[in-house]
Image (cartoon, rainbow, N blue to C red):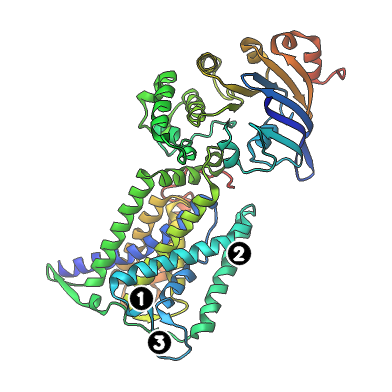
Amino acid sequence: MGSLLQVLFDALSLGSLYALGALGIALIFGVMRLVNFAHGDVIAACVFALLWPSVDAVAIIFAGNLPWYLLVPFVLAFGAALSVACEALVFRRFRRANPATMMIASFALGFVIRYFLLMLFSSRPKSVSLLPALSQPVEILGARIPLLQLITIAVTMAVLFGLTAFLRRTRFGLEMRAAAENFTMARMLGVRANRVIMGAFALSGALAAAIALILGSQTGTANIMMGASVMLMAFIATVIGGMGSLAGAVLAGFLLGAVATVMQVILPPEARAFRDAFVYGAVILVLIFRPQGLLSARGTRERV
Amino acid sequence: MSLLALSNVSVRYGRLVAVRGITFSLGEGEILFITGPNGAGKSSLLRAIAGVTPPSGGRIDFADHDITGRAPEDIARFGLAMVPEGRDAFGGLTIEENLMVGTGMHSATRGWKARAATELEAVYATFPILKDRRHAQAGLLSGGQQQMLVIGRALMTNPRLVAIDEPSLGLAPNITDQVYERLTALLAMRKLTLLIVEQSSTRAMMVGGRMMLMRGGEILLDGDARALGQSEAMQAAYFGYGEP
């Protein structure tokens, strides 16, 4: 019972991370058909926002020393601002470009962010003790669950409910959903393209920041590559969820987390090193049988 | 003073010229049908007016604004409501949400919420089927219902000009009758200028008003719908024998 519960919480917390990442990608894909590969580097940048630039091995904690009620809004705002800046400085110039061009631009932008971090912080991973109180375990029905896992799951649920309420109940959310289905039609109804796209980037950046906070506390390190692995899984989740479908992205994120965790448990020890190969194999199977994704998005028309 | 005025407007897609230097104006309260065969440039012309495909040449004035090259959301704010071909309802949104999308652009003016609510009731009065299914997803509606939805959605923006691209496309004739019935009823109720694109001139002759015939990106004929519809010149121009 205890170990089963442990696996469940492992799966949920890993899935949360993937779901948050997939949401950030699906939000932007929904409104502008851009697959934003710079998302992972925005995550990394958010972790480094806690540090003072230096190439020394020992990190100089800067914003990371703030109390949590200031730290969390600061990182979220930083992520949103960075993401909006990416839109204003780079992606806005590619509005009328085809999706492949935009995707390549996002790769390039990701490299720019990554090497900027490299220049400021060097490639050595740095240790950051972010919110150390969270790594203590909690006893639930005989299972020892790290408090951070519980918080990760709770935060993800809160984000999902908050985002759903935002999209369903607010005027801006209505405009975003309309724009995600048919951007041109939404504009002909007076929906401002720039505002909606900026909003999507701000939300996506804040989601990246949430992942950064979770990853930073979980691993205790800041590494310029740390966004990449989450980004890859999150991207796969958006694909098997059905590009642009927010619900699909979340569902697939949790599914991937579950599959990865279960494989870790059931695979024979000598095969565990190849866990990811099995996960990707499962992804291929899903795509063979449902190439449009689990929940395919409705609006697949041309964008702006 | 005309509500909409085009002078020498051209639209091209790369090297393909869809609209060749068109000039016409449309007065407040007029009904204009633009007819013509497939590929005549009718939809391209509408897209240029709505700001979706900026014209490659010429000038468009609407409601005392030069709207040449302006963004669609700005043109919509001046009072142009576009109902594009293929009934672009937001399928995943409910009917009521579809209707409300276009009201947000007036959110800077006072009392817009009350006005939107009144407008919503007016649209529901015109299209009762929409009210019955107000919380259903728009994607589940039949073609005729969707056509009524997108016309209702256009009316919700409190427009001065409603431009409709092929309202009868893909609809059974009796459903098309219903759509036009509602449209003409609307015209009797409120001050509205209509620009309707149709392939055939039959509807124009039934409803009446002004009709233009487009072919090869140019306007070949312009006149009273009923008179034009029966003329020999119309037939000739539509099918392209004996240059008019």
Which residue is label 2 attached to?
A105
- How many angstroms separate mark 2 from mark 3 (CA)? 31 Å
Q: Do the residues at pointers 1 and 3 share their chain?
A: yes
Chain containing the residue with disc 3 = A
Hey, which quadrant is residue B77 in on the image? top right
Say whether marks 2 and 1 touch (CB < 8 Å). Answer: no
Secondary structure state at the residue bearing disc 3: loop
Q: How far across and down, in percent of the image, does residue A13 sit?
A: 29, 66
Tell which tag, 2 or 3, sits nearer the viewer.
3
Q: Is residue B23 left or right of residue A6?
A: right
Q: Marks 1/3: CA distance?
A: 13 Å
Q: Are marks 2 and 3 on the same chain?
A: yes
The residue wearing badge 3 is A59
Say whether residue A40 is left or right of residue B244: left
Q: Position of residue B143 (x, y in %)?
A: 50, 26
State the SS at label 2.
helix
Q: Is residue A63 visible?
A: yes
Crowding at mark 2 (Cα within 10 Å: few <14, some 14-19, many 20+): many
For the residue pair A102 and B30, the one nearer the viewer reads as B30
Q: Quadrant of residue B50?
A: top right
Q: Which amino acid does label 1 sit on?
A: Gly
Residue at image x 37%, y 24%? B131
Image check: B202 left or right of B14? Answer: left
Q: What residue type is labelled 3?
A: Ala
Q: Which mark is residue A216?
A: 1
Mark positioned earlier in the residue sequence (2 or 3): 3
- Eye-nearest disc, 1 or 3: 3
Q: Where is residue A160 in the image (x, y as percent from the top left)?
A: 33, 55
**Tag 1 subunit:** A
